[in-house]
Image (cartoon, rainbow, N blue to C red):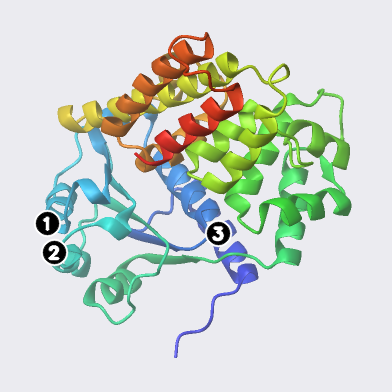
Amino acid sequence: MAEKVTFASCEAEFRRLMGDIKARKFAPIYLLQGEEFYFIDALCDALSEGIMEESMRAFNQIVIYGNDTDGGTVASYCRQLPMMGEYEAIIVKEAQQLDKMELLNAYAASPQASTILVLCHKGKAMDRRTPLYKSIKAKGVVFDSVSPRDYEAERWLSGFAATKGLKLDSASSKILVAHLGVDISKISNELEKMIVSLPKERTTITPEDIENHIGISRQFNNYELSNAILDRQLEKALTIAQHMGENPKAYPLLLTVKVLYDSFRQLFTYNYICWDSRRRGVAMPDQGELFRILHINNPYFLRDIARRAPMWQNSKVFKILGLCAEYDAKSKGIDDGGASNGELLREFILKIMML
């Protein structure tokens, strides 16, 4: 019977693997799987950046998504030889959606020494009884990413803040976990956004900082509304909209529509870049270029866009951009049917969520 993976053992294995990557001790295959996405994404990013120099990634690194390919295609990529480099890296994101995964069995049983295959398998773990799992376990690395309990999440967040040179007191960590749950990927993302906005001389994060910068003290604003909609949290979005509709002077509909338009325009652009890169068989633009294209200057905003992009296909986003134009006009009194700003906002949100 397999030994149960705890959050503590998951953390320890994560640190070990990060050390190996830094020391350039690579396995031929990595299966990064589980419910906690933070460790999967961090290891994937470390491998992507650590296997080869950025200048070589356009030639020797392929990033694909599970729902866009199948096991046979991935196996074919893996059998390619690197161009003017030591390794070929094949990174499969959302590998849990990979069709015909069994076509990887033969390759996994005898992987190529010059290829590093990374399978980011989020959610339910791969069946341990399958030949593919057994081959990866024997020839490569299987990393099981598990979610923490409340107290483990609080401890982890304090350690995470310490790596940024800041102290997160217990009250602050409890507030974060109480309001955001034990999804450390989400919590750490919000915490990093806040850290960027703090004065450089600050050494401690207080509950007041969290309330002011993360907005978990029941604050209602366009940022929170945009997040709720982009994360498809209808109930939360309507709750925020109701408060905003009751305070139209503080929350003009015209500004709200603009914020949502900008958010969905970023998603549309990012989705197009992903599609175009796959079409041309080239790597995604580097972070600096994506910052320029998307008009952002923070890696955490980019991570949010990348996380949400699969939830919003461009065929839907295109329609939403049209809705933004429609409700921009209505916010100015054009064909608004005499509806209040609050009624128009609720109608706007429901139309978005129905797509």
User: Residue at coordinates 79% horizontally, 41% vertically from top-left?
Assistant: 217
Q: Name the element at disc 2.
A: helix
Do labels 2 and 1 touch, CB within 8 Å? yes
x and y percentages locating residue 131 in the rendered image: 22, 77
- Residue where numbered disc 3 is placed: 14
- The amino acid on which the numbered mark 1 sits, given as a three-letter code, is Gly
| Residue 51: % across, % down | 38, 42
Seen from the viewer's position, the closer of residues 246 and 172 is 246
Left or right: 254 in relation to 213? left
**Screen quadrant of the N terminus:** bottom left
Secondary element type, mark 3: helix
Q: Residue at x 87, y 34 (%)?
A: 203
Q: Nearer the viewer, residue 128 or 189?
A: 189
Q: Which residue is mark 1?
A: 72
* Residue behind mark 2: 103
Measured in 3D between alpha carbons, the distance from the residue under mark 2 to the one under mark 1, in whole angstroms, is 5 Å
In the rendered image, the vertical position of residue 340 relative to residue 92, given as above or below: above
Nearer to us of marks 3 and 2 is 2
Residue in the foreground of this view, choosing between 119 and 172 = 172
* Distance (Cα) linking label 1 and label 3: 29 Å
Q: Residues within 10 Å of mark 3 (few under 14, many from 20)?
A: some
**Three-letter amino acid code at the position of disc 3:** Phe
Closest to the camera, between mark 1 and mark 3, is 1
Q: Position of residue 337 (x, y in %)?
A: 47, 19
Can residue 205 be spotted in the picture? no
Residue 231 lies, with reference to residue 199, above or below; the image says below
Residue at image point 52% right, 18% down = 338
Q: Which of the 4 quarters of the picture holds residue 259? A: top right
